[in-house]
Amino acid sequence: MASLSRSRSRHTSSRSTASGHTATRHAASATLTALLALSLAGCGSTPPERPAPGGAAPSHSAAPASDTHERLRVGAATRSYLLHRPGGDRQDRPRPLLLAFHGRGETAEDMRERGRLDKAAGARGMLVAHLEAVRKMWSADTTPTPQRPDPNVDIHFAEKLISTLVRGGEADPKRVYAVGFSNGGSMALRLAAQRPGTVAGAASVSGQLAAGPARTGPSGPVSVMIVYGADDRVRPMAGVPNPPPPAAGQEPMTATVSTRAGAEAFARAAGTKPPVTEKRPGYDRIRWAPGAPGKAPVELLVMHDAGHTWPGSTVPPPPRFGRTSTSLNATNTVLDFLTGIGTKAGAGTKAKTSPESETGTP
């Protein structure tokens, strides 16, 4: 019995000793973990971010670029447009806004594909709205027609779209621009002529200013660029003062002044200096420099051996439209001009443009 008691005593002592060692190891481990945590907190960890000036916490929420099909009630009609929002900081607002007008017989999607404005303007942090015309034609003049009794419907559409995006905090009212192709280019010029306080600048590719009784002459200074093919046979540079009668059920063509006369009208309204012509590879650049610092410039780029097309576009035009020039990239060129990069050089000097402006794919 005594031997059994001693054996039990030794086993109990062994278990107690083992438990003691285990407890000691756990305590040491806990102590080491705590010391490491303190060391990291004091030396190696990233310090907490401090609030931005003004007390606001810093934001790193970057929004991806998005493309949406939007509808807008304008008077009794519902109009539509494609809106491209560039990616970036969600708090990077308001942004510059570019209104894009497609050509006659085309759609907003056609204009998006031809000019690739979403990518180029988005890289500049701009919102891009491709507007959709009624029956695929814009009211580029002030003439009522049976199909369009109110010739100002498209002016109202543009104004409502701008005010909607401005009120929503997305668009900067001081940085609104218009660009268009063909009939859409004439629409961009009409908007600039009649609403010089609404848009900061306009660019027209293969589009002219309206002529005749419905002429929309410039009513104030605004920066304007016109890009035109010297061999345009659809709407020649000399203008179309007396267009042929329309086919049955079709809206009439817009009567237009010559390309040069349209540019000169904007130059007079802006009070520019006399024009200076530069010969460049593949085109001529006629520039009316601002009459005073901060005033509006006007430019006319005449593309050699080019037709009724968008220079630099990779979208094949209809055969009757003629050749597409590759001497410059119209997309980047007009965007540089509108946003100010291409307007800071003095008359007769080469404007500072992005590397992609001269040539390349949009």
Image (cartoon, helix red, strand yellow):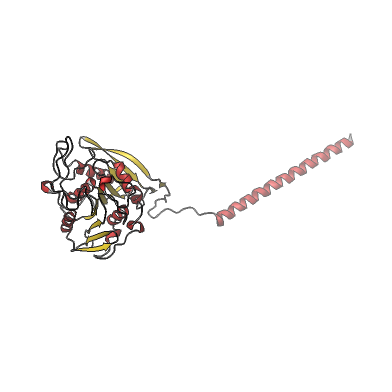
The total of numbered circles placed on residues is 0
Q: Nearer the viewer, residue 145 or 328?
A: 328
Q: Position of residue 159 (x, y in %)?
A: 22, 44
Q: Is residue 265 visible?
A: yes
Q: Give the answer, above or below, for where 126 lies relative to 287.
A: above
155 relative position to 329: left or right = left
Q: Say which quarter of the image contains residue 151.
A: top left
10 relative position to 347: left or right = right
Instruction: Identify the residue at the far front of this view.
Output: 319
Q: Nearer the viewer, residue 192 or 358?
A: 358
Which residue is found at the position 19% from the left and 43% from the top?
A: 139
Query: Which quarter of the figure is the N terminus placed in?
Result: top right
Q: Give the answer, above or below, for where 219 lies relative to 252.
A: below
Q: Position of residue 208 (x, y in %)?
A: 19, 50
Q: Give the answer, above or below, for where 29 lies relative to 301.
A: above
Q: Is residue 168 visible?
A: no
Q: Position of residue 294 (x, y in %)?
A: 23, 61
Instruction: Identify the residue at the far left of this view.
Output: 213
Q: Position of residue 40 (x, y in %)?
A: 57, 54
